[in-house]
């Protein structure tokens, strides 16, 4: 009697619970550290070389970020527009073909489930991208609509090409039509035998694009970009450098600056769009959608708290610190969710969640900051003030055509 050979232990699926993206093998020569993060079932670099080097590539040359693990859904069918208008806060009727919009989706209580971007690929076809998987919720919400919903995360490889020389590098590999491409728009074309979509989008607050391609073309795309950008400072970046850039841009992250209402355990930890300072994403006049009645009530009542931008004295990042309304630290005003010393702005900046009475104050606030130095903790009382976001907004981000460098 013969038995089928068993798989080698090294090949067994449970030996590698996290997947590699289609760019991994091509990017391997640039990985100088052993710093990886888990992102929706994939293992991706947190740092390729050093965070500082990668951050300055975003602001001064060209950065390459693998965003394949971003969750992607194809939503298609005769009712695709009507369905999306029912589940997200933005008005999808105003979204033209080959345009992109940032939006939120809420539960019936008006609390934010997640945020993401919607790409309109055709009259009846959309792509929804999000930080976390939402398939069950999307399918449950589709009852009564003639629509198909499919997760296509593994079917589409994607690279973010960000920074001042991003336009020049993309044009150098033969991608066309980018000089007239405006922010939050996209073009489709054939490139080296592959169908490619290029969108003028990104998470850095700088001039940037995202390139979408089938997995079999991923290695060619990576190698072509690295070769074309060799004399223009192209640098692969990991999550840590991207996180610095997104704070400067004033962008927020789930589970960092807010918690999805699907994950909260304690009452009162959910957030409405008003509390996230994202009222501009809500189209209350478009008709009924998930959470609309609750959002109307929340708008009338006013927010309990709000995300704001802060500028702090000194140069020590204050992530996780408490914010007080007085120097004696007796009246707590809120807490800081994201913070950094900005190398570009030479400012100590932060995103903070403040209680309503302190959201619009022009008076000084105070941060209780703890520093760990040589095995000892030092406590500092640091003055801060509310400032506008984004902290960093270069003219090249919106310039059309973008400057050549």
Image (cartoon, helix red, strand yellow):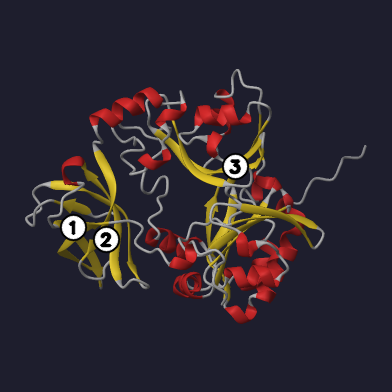
Give whichever of 167, 320 is nearer the camera.
Answer: 167
Image quarter hosting the C terminus: bottom right
The residue where tag 1 is placed is 367
Q: Is residue 68 above or below residue 33?
A: above
- Where residue 388 sits, quadrant-wise, is bottom left
Give the total number of marks visible in the rendering. 3
Q: Where residue 77 sits: x, y (%)?
A: 68, 29
The residue where tag 2 is placed is 318
Can residue 319 be seen at all in this image of the molecule?
Answer: no
The residue where tag 3 is placed is 96
Residue depicted at 46% across the width and 71% down the height = 59
How crowded is the residue under tag 1: few (<14 C-alpha within 10 Å), some, or many (20+)? many
Residue depicted at 36% across the width and 38% down the height = 273
Give whichever of 19, 262 is nearer the camera.
Answer: 262
| Residues at discs 1 and 2 in contact (Cβ within 8 Å) | yes
Image quarter hosting the N terminus: top right
Left or right: residue 193 compared with residue 28: right
Q: CA distance from mark 3 to mark 1?
A: 45 Å
Q: Is residue 133 above or below residue 370?
A: above
- Which is more foreground, mark 2 or mark 3? 3
**Which element type, helix, strand or loop, lies under badge 3?**
loop
- Which is more foreground, mark 3 or mark 1? 3
Residue depicted at 68% across the width and 66% down the height = 222
Q: From this viewpoint, which residue is outermost toward the right?
A: 1
| Residues at discs 3 and 1 in contact (Cβ within 8 Å) | no
Q: Earlier in the sequence, mark 2 or mark 3?
A: 3
Q: Earlier in the sequence, mark 3 or mark 1?
A: 3
């Amino acid at each position: 009697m013969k038995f089928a050979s068993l798989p080698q232990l090294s090949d067994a699926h449970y030996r590698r619970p996290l997947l590699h993206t289609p760019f991994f093998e091509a990017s391997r020569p640039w990985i100088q550290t052993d710093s990886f993060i888990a992102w929706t079932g994939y293992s991706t670099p947190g740092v390729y070389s050093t965070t500082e080097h990668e951050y300055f590539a975003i602001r001064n040359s060209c950065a390459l970020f693998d965003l394949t693990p971003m969750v992607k859904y194809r939503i298609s069918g005769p009712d695709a527009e009507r369905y999306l208008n029912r589940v997200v806060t933005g008005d999808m009727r105003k979204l033209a073909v080959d345009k992109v919009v940032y939006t939120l989706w809420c539960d019936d209580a008006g609390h934010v489930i997640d945020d993401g971007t919607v790409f309109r690929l055709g009259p009846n076809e959309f792509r929804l991208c999000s930080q976390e998987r939402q398939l069950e919720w999307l399918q449950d919400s589709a009852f009564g609509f003639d629509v198909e919903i499919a997760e296509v995360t593994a079917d589409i490889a994607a690279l973010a090409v960000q920074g001042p020389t991003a336009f020049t590098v993309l044009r150098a590999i033969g991608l066309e039509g980018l000089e007239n491409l405006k922010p939050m728009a996209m073009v489709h074309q054939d490139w080296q035998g592959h169908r490619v979509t290029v969108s003028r989008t990104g998470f850095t607050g700088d001039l940037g694009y995202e390139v979408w391609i089938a997995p079999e073309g991923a290695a060619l795309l990576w190698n072509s970009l690295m070769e074309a950008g060799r004399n223009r400072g192209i640098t692969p970046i990991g999550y840590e450098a991207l996180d610095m850039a997104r704070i400067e841009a004033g962008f927020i992250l789930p589970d960092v600056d807010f918690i999805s209402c699907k994950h909260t355990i304690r009452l009162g930890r959910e957030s409405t769009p008003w509390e996230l300072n994202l009222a501009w994403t809500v189209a209350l006049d478009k008709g009924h959608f998930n959470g609309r009645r609750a959002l109307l009530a929340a708008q009338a009542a006013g927010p309990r708290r709000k995300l704001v931008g802060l500028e702090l004295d000194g140069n020590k990042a204050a992530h996780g610190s408490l914010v007080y309304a007085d120097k004696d630290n007796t009246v707590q005003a809120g807490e800081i969710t994201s913070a950094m010393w900005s190398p570009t702005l030479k400012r100590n900046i932060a995103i903070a969640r403040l209680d309503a009475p302190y959201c619009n104050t022009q008076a000084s606030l105070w941060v209780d900051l703890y520093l760990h130095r040589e095995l000892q903790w030092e406590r500092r009382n640091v003055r801060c003030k509310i400032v506008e976001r984004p902290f960093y907004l270069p003219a090249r981000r919106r310039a059309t055509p973008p400057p050549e460098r």
